[in-house]
Image (spheres, rainbow, N blue to C red):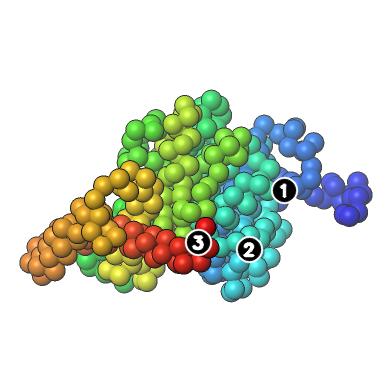
Amino acid sequence: MRARKSGQDEREDKAATGCQVEGKDCYSRVLPVESNSEKDCTSMFITVGICTFNRAESLRRTLDSLVAMRVPSDLAWEIVIVNNNSTDHTDDVISEYIGRLPVRREFEPRPGKSNAQNRSIDVAKGDYLVYTDDDVVVDVGWLTAYAEAFRRWPEAALFGGRITPKYEPPVEKWVMESEAVLKGPYAVRDFGDHVLALSADDEGHFPFGANLAIRAREQRAFRYDPELGPIPNKIRNHDEIDVIHRLLGSGATGYWLPDARVEHCIGRDRQTLRYIAAYYEGYGETWAFRNAAATAAGPFWFGIPRGIWPRLLVWWVLYHLCRFVFPVPVWVTYLEAYSFNKGKARYWMQRKVEMQRKAKVEPIA
């Protein structure tokens, strides 16, 4: 049992943490997780959630950008970092920021980002959960932009912000030439300088998880599906897209905020055709998983929906024929289409193997 804190200890826990940004003092209250009295006397309390796995130095860069943020003096906040069973020095990096940031570490042993996200939901104390990733640099006004939006639209439950790529040099020439068609793999979200209302029918403007905010009570009602998102042995995505679909479909409202800015750091390891192909294979596998019930009613060839076979052939041929003839965005689009259908085919082959394995181990009645 935890010992009761003295009055002096409680006052120290509630003390402001200061930082210098462009010559100005900025302060944010560091709240003990057990305290409700401090939360009640402030106008707003925000939880920043970060899930991380084996990216200790990348996480350090993200935390450095959070140290540099301007935070309104009347805003209480915390940072919950969920270590999803990392084997590197992630915990050591987190420890370096205790006292510099209102940070606390949580541990989620079950692999998969959705499990880590659900852990952050369980432990968050904020009225809103604002998510970013461990490969992101946040703008100095990032959290302020969200806090202002929460006050401006108190009825809204969902918010998202601008994500622009920050490439590790030297940048591959083909990446820059095809940037317009790489918004998915690089999680780019930039819709201009005006606020946009979000709609369940317009997935093309859904926020991405690197820059996303959800009101706590709705987030607890709409949790993340452990079958989606990065998970060992399954290349899937759309974990936050699934939550947003269900949330907006329930009647909730939301807004995209151009002033809530972050940069998504794109390392050299992601500036490869292998990475782009793997991303779209994961997208295809995710699509097949989410639409399995409807697809299962159609015709199959060798365990794969019949319509996938000609698409695989056509897009594979177009990609290989056009790669050295057509402009880069053209053949990159063909690679995306081929990889997407390859991911769908892989899902159905894996499902077939799993069903056969299950049939062997189940006793015959």
Give the secondary structure at mark 1. strand
Q: Which amino acid does the dot numbered 1 rest on? A: Val
Q: Which amino acid does the dot numbered 3 rest on? A: Ile
Give the secondary structure at mark 2. loop
Q: Which amino acid does the dot numbered 2 rest on? A: Pro
Q: Position of residue 83 (x, y in %)?
A: 61, 62
Q: Is residue 323 above or below residue 181?
A: below
User: 147 or 50, which lies in front?
Assistant: 50
- Mark 2 or 1 closer to N-term? 1
Q: Quadrant of residue 92?
A: bottom right
**Going 74% across and 33% down the picture, which residue do you hit?**
40
Residue 44 seen anywhere in this rendered image of the structure: yes
Q: Position of residue 189 (x, y in %)?
A: 36, 47
Q: Is residue 288 above or below residue 233?
A: above
* Marks 1 and 3, how far apart at CA: 60 Å
Give the secondary structure at mark 3. loop
- Please state, as top left, top right, bottom left or bottom right, where the N terminus lies in the image: bottom right
* Marks 2 and 3, how far apart at CA: 36 Å
**Going 53% across and 25% down the picture, which residue do you hit?**
155
User: 202 or 169, which lies in front?
Assistant: 202
* Marks 2 and 1, how far apart at CA: 27 Å
Question: For mark 2, does the 10 Å Cα neighbourhood hold few (<14), some (14 to 19), or many (20 or more) residues?
Answer: few
Residue 188 seen anywhere in this rendered image of the structure: no
Please name the residue that numbered disc 2 is placed on: 109
Please name the residue that numbered disc 1 is placed on: 30
Please name the residue that numbered disc 3 is placed on: 364
- Mark 1 or 3 closer to N-term? 1
